[in-house]
Each structure stands twice: as structure tokens, then as C-alpha cells.
Image (spheres, helix red, strand yellow):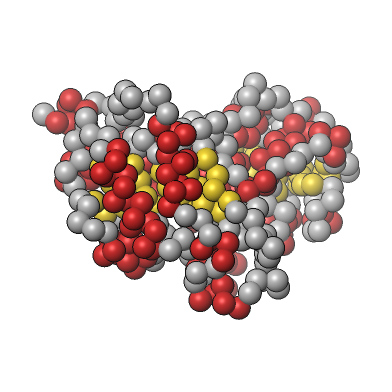
Amino acid sequence: MVGFDKEKLPPRPKILLIKLRSIGDVIYNTAVYTPLKRLFPDSHLTVLVERPSYDLVREHPDVDEVLCFHKGSLWRQVRFYWKLFSKGYDMAIDMHEGTRGAIMCFVTQAPFRVGHKYAKRSFFYNVKLEFNDLQPKFPLDYQVALIKKLGASFDQIAPAVHLSEASRENALRLLQENGICPEDRYCIIHTGTRKIYNQWQCEKFARLADILSSRYGLKIIITCGPGEEDQAQAVIDRMEGTPSTFIMAELMDLAVITEGAEFAVCHNGGYMHLASVLGTPVIALYGSVHPRVWRPLGEKDVVVYKQVECSPCNHQTRKKECYKGDAECMQIITVDDVLAGVDKILEGNTELKIRAFPHRGELDR
């Protein structure tokens, strides 16, 4: 079966959308939920993600259920795959295209198992869609193209992360506990990265924080991801007396804090995509990855990338010394390069940014 006739689906179909991998991938994938639900308005839409991305999806108004895959024991995985089979999905859509996603799609035994015709594991699908005529160029384009081939229409292509009232309240309390008032202007320096060859030098982050405080009068919030606390502390230790706040928060609480920032400085990664989709201008530091594919989507986002001979690279071409930190592609990014991005973002922006914290007065009382 190559094409797809939506009229063959039963009333109120149960649809499973599989999107594993990283936070950035899942953030982009949110762009297809509303068009898919509009195509099948009476459907029950379940989205399958991995644990780090669960909170990004669960508040989306067009998602009825979120399944979370854990890489646990063999018995735990067997139970999970049995659950997929026993749910009785009418259609399963593999938007992961890896081996695990394709197997999950097959295990459902859904009458319609949808995937990209040219995926390596396409033999697990019985509805194989080809979309080269749509000429996708970027990761978001590929996800949208597959859903378009099912018959969905897009008014606009826009990933969306929905934040809960609980997250907004938690974030406001975190800010208040750390001395950040509603009228304060602040920026975020997200220091961490799990890939040491992508790490910008801690002393540069520290110097940047000093200047952002003294030159622009901004309060500085230092953040990082789980397991990256040492990187954040190394930055704080190198700052020259600049007041700063270190906030370690749950992902969606951090998202709310980010939404209220003037801008965020960070490495290429999941947090970068989250901040950009939330509408907070991003200054993104690139080294081993070329930004032409995975660049942030916001109009005011700034990419700092100085291509060297060996960049972009992979595990086969990357220099051994890069795994010790201080990769050349990151070394040559200067504090002035980042400050130029700050000036571009703040140019003409003399008014306070409107915060996205509802019910502030009620919480203050």
C-alpha cells in the first residue's frame, strides 16, 4: 500500500504518532499536531516520546494522550511493546525513522502503518509516503511534508510549546525566591552542554555575564541542564563580583522563566530550540554542527558560528583534542561576537519586555 485514503479509517480513529529522540526534534514535531487533529477531528491522538520530552507535549490542546518510552530492563520494554499492541490503534505514524520507531510502528499492527517511503526501515510500514515533490530542506520540513501527504493542510508552520498554569506559578515563585522582581529585566546564560567539544569556555561566559550586568543593567540568571551543574558553577566562580542567580528548574518551569527573559545565550541544543519557539531571542553558539540545518527559527535569533576547516565534524573526523574541551571552533568565538548579537537583539528595544506570567497580582497577594 503506497497511498492513503482517509475515508477507510473508522469513525473516531485511534492514532499513534511516534517521535522519539531529542528535545529539539520533538519541539519541531509539535507543528503537526493541530493540522493532524484538524484532518481527523474525531480522532484520539496519542503521541509517543521519550522521557526528556514528555512535559513538552502533555499540555498541547490537540494531544489526547502522551506515552513515554523508557529504556529500562528487557521485561519493562516487553511490557511497553505489549501495551502498544493491545491499544488497538487504527493508524500509527512513524516520524522517528530510526529502527526503534519503525519497530514500534510495526508492533502496533495498526491497519495503517505510515512512514517515509525511503526510510531505511520502510519495510515495517504498509503506507509508504513519498514527498520529494514538496522539496523539504530542514528537519521541520520533513515532518510537515509527511503529514501533508496524509491530506493535512497548514495555515502556518509553527511549532508550539504550551505552558501550564502550575509551571507559571512555580516559575514566578522561583524568580521571587531568587530576588527577581516582576519589573526586573533579566537575561539567561544557559551554560551547559553534554558534549564537551561544543562547550564555550567558562571564562568567556563569566566575562560576558559581567559585561551584560554592568553595560546593560540586566540581571543575570545562570541555568543549565541536569548533570551540567559543574559547568554552571565554573562560570559563576569566574565572574568578578557580578550579582547572579543560579536557577536549576524543571524543564517547563525553566521554559516560563525563559519566556520572560530579554534574550538567552546558549549552545546549539534542545534548550536553544525551546527558547526560540517560546519567542525569546536566542544567541546560539555553534561549533561542530553547521547551523544551516539546525538553526533556531526565531526572526530575532542570532547565530554565532565561525567555520573552521574541520567543521562541521562527526565522531570519525573530530580531532582527539576536542574531546578534552577547548575545541578550536569554540575557541575562536569571542565575547565581542556574542555582544554584537546582544546589540542586534536589543537595538531600539528600550521598553521592558512584557512578561508572560498570568495572575501575577493574585500570586503577589
Q: Is 103 displayed left or right of 343 in the figure?
A: right
Task: Tell me: residue 34, above or below residue 313.
Answer: above
**Eyeballing the image, is 226 above or below 319?**
above
Which quarter of the picture shows residue 166? top left
Residue 71: x and y in percent read: 54, 66
In this rendered view, identify the residue nearer to me: 221 or 153. 221
**Residue 44 pos. (x, y %):** 59, 35
Towards the viewer: 130 or 243: 243
Q: Quadrant of the N terminus?
A: top right
The answer to which of 319 and 153 lies nearer the viewer is 319
Q: Residue at x 81, y 33 (%)?
A: 134
Residue at the limit of the structure toward the left, as seen here: 365
Residue name at image x 19 percent, y 36 percent = 181
Could you tell me how many numbered marks the image carries?
Answer: 0
Residue 267 location, x and y as percent?
A: 49, 54
Query: Can see residue 139?
Result: yes
Q: Is residue 10 above or below residue 94?
A: above
Quadrant including the C terminus: top left
- The answer to whether 203 appears left or right of 308 in the picture is left
Q: Residue at x 65, y 71 (%)?
A: 318
Residue ID at (80%, 53%): 119
> Which is nearer the eye, 148 or 24?
24
Please indicate, yes or no, whether residue 87 appears anywhere in the rendered image.
Answer: no
Q: Position of residue 6 (x, y in %)?
A: 77, 30
Taking the image as shown, residue 348 lies to the left or right of residue 302, namely: left
- Residue 214's image quarter? top left
